[in-house]
Amino acid sequence: MIVKNGASTLGRCLESVRSVVDEIVIVDTGSTDASVSIGRQFGARVVEVPWADDFSKARNAALREGHCDWVLFLDADEMLDKESAKTIAPLLTQSDVMGYDVRIWNYVLALTDRVLSRPATLNPHLLSAARMFPGYVEHVNVRLFLRHCDIVFEGRVHEGVADRMKRLGLRVLPAQFVVHHLGIAEEKAEERSRKMEYYRQLGRRKLSDSPNDARAYYELGLGELEHFHDPRAALPYFIRAIELKPHSSVLWTCLGCCLVRLGRFCEAVEALGVAEKCGARDVSYLEALGDAQYHLEKFGEAEKNYEAAKVAGSRSSVLECKLGVCEVRLGNARTGLGRICEAIGRAPAFGELYDIGIAAALFAQDERLAAEIAERRLGIGVPSAESFLLTAGIHAKLGKWQRSAEIIQAGSERFPGDASLHSALAEVNEKLRAVS
């Protein structure tokens, strides 16, 4: 392990491996909390190493301190599944196997959340510490490997041994045990944002270290797309990654998602077509294709792909809303609006659901429902000036001029410098005078 200020979670992590491992090695990179003493309480050999803006250097320092034949690596905000003791030991007797791909469950706060562009799955509640989280996003990575002089960590950030083992032709098989990662769900939003900005900086330095590394371009592009919500910044990273690795279904899918968010829907369909030829049939691909087709007004095709994404495992309330608006556009307004209202009820704190619901209600010419959803939207997160204008406009369409004026007034107080709100307020007040 490498640890820095992990005292809040380190104890439970070490407890989860206590009966499985023969030794615990912790490289501490500058903790100012109780991490070092907690590690030593569990019998760990703690080595203090200065932080050098390089996760691989710290991992490899820990690797050099170990003596066992096999290595399992974890982070302080992770826990080993309690059934793993029964499943790990037989893996270590497999001849010619140098490592194992381990399933990692990244717990999230909502089924609408994604990690590395992957959708969330319902939490089966195997771990008591994760019972409060509705779902997780799974990815696999080599976390268990045979100690060997050629197997070392690579990458300044998002470090690992998997790529090196693949280049060396070393045999890696899937393992059935699970590592539970609770950090994404537990850390505060401010802490997460600081971490992602730091990872972005390290990612750029990683790219300078390895300018022809397709994975480095992919990681930077994904960060820009999913965390910083900047598809324009993400696009060149995905394009360059594809130049270096042209047959990757994941990269072509990411490019398609990026083009959808940029409003370049025909190009998105073309990119996703290449992704399919490369083998893509996962949820991210299907939902992105559905999005592109919806915006091209191919509602039947979009509906089929959204349904296929559900079959592929998506439990996203956003996907349910997208299906609902497709049903509205295909003439089945009652079913579609009902589906959307149910989805909002399941995830009432997620603003995007309301946005889709407002649009669907307006398409269905149900201004009363649109006004109701829009009013609720103003209480979710930090509403924009456009949200106030839209909500007021719907009320104006219903002839509710007084309520329209109240909403615009509230928006003007929140956004005192917004000229559109001030102009709209003057128009609504003039209308109120005319009808009074």
Image (cartoon, rainbow, N blue to C red):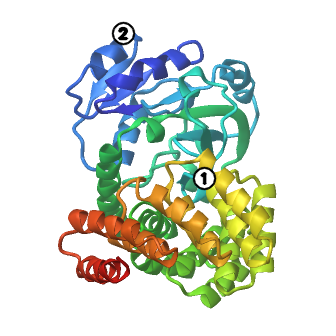
What's the distance in space between the residues labelled 1 and 2, CA to CA?
47 Å
User: Residue 41 — which label?
Assistant: 2
Q: Nearer the viewer, residue 48 or 298?
A: 298
Q: Is residue 300 above or below residue 48?
A: below
Q: Is residue 431 above or below residue 182?
A: below
Q: Nearer the viewer, residue 325 or 170?
A: 325
Is residue 128 in sight in this rendering? yes
User: Residue 344 — which label?
Assistant: 1
The quarter holding residue 426 reads: bottom left
Q: Residue 239, percent across and down?
A: 51, 81
The quarter holding residue 167 reads: bottom right
Characterize the local packing of mark 2: few (<14), some (14-19) or many (20 or more) Cα atoms within 10 angstroms: few
The amino acid at mark 2 is Gln
User: Total label count?
Assistant: 2
- Residue located farthest toward the bottom when viewing the structure as drawn: 266
Is label 1 or label 2 in front? 1
Label 2, secondary structure: give it.
Answer: helix
Label 1, secondary structure: give it.
Answer: helix
User: Residue 309 — which label?
Assistant: none
Labels 1 & 2 near each other (Cβ < 8 A): no
Q: Residue 232, percent across and down?
A: 42, 79
Quarter of the image with the C terminus is bottom left
Q: Residue 100, percent across and down?
A: 66, 40
- Residue located farthest toward the front when viewing the structure as drawn: 436
Q: Give the residue at x 75% y 70%.
A: 333
Is residue 169 in sight in this rendering? no
Q: Give the residue at x 30% y 26%.
A: 47
Q: Give the residue at x 64% y 71%.
A: 366
The mark that comes first in sequence, 1 or 2, is: 2
The amino acid at mark 1 is Ile
Q: Residue 176, percent across and down?
A: 73, 34
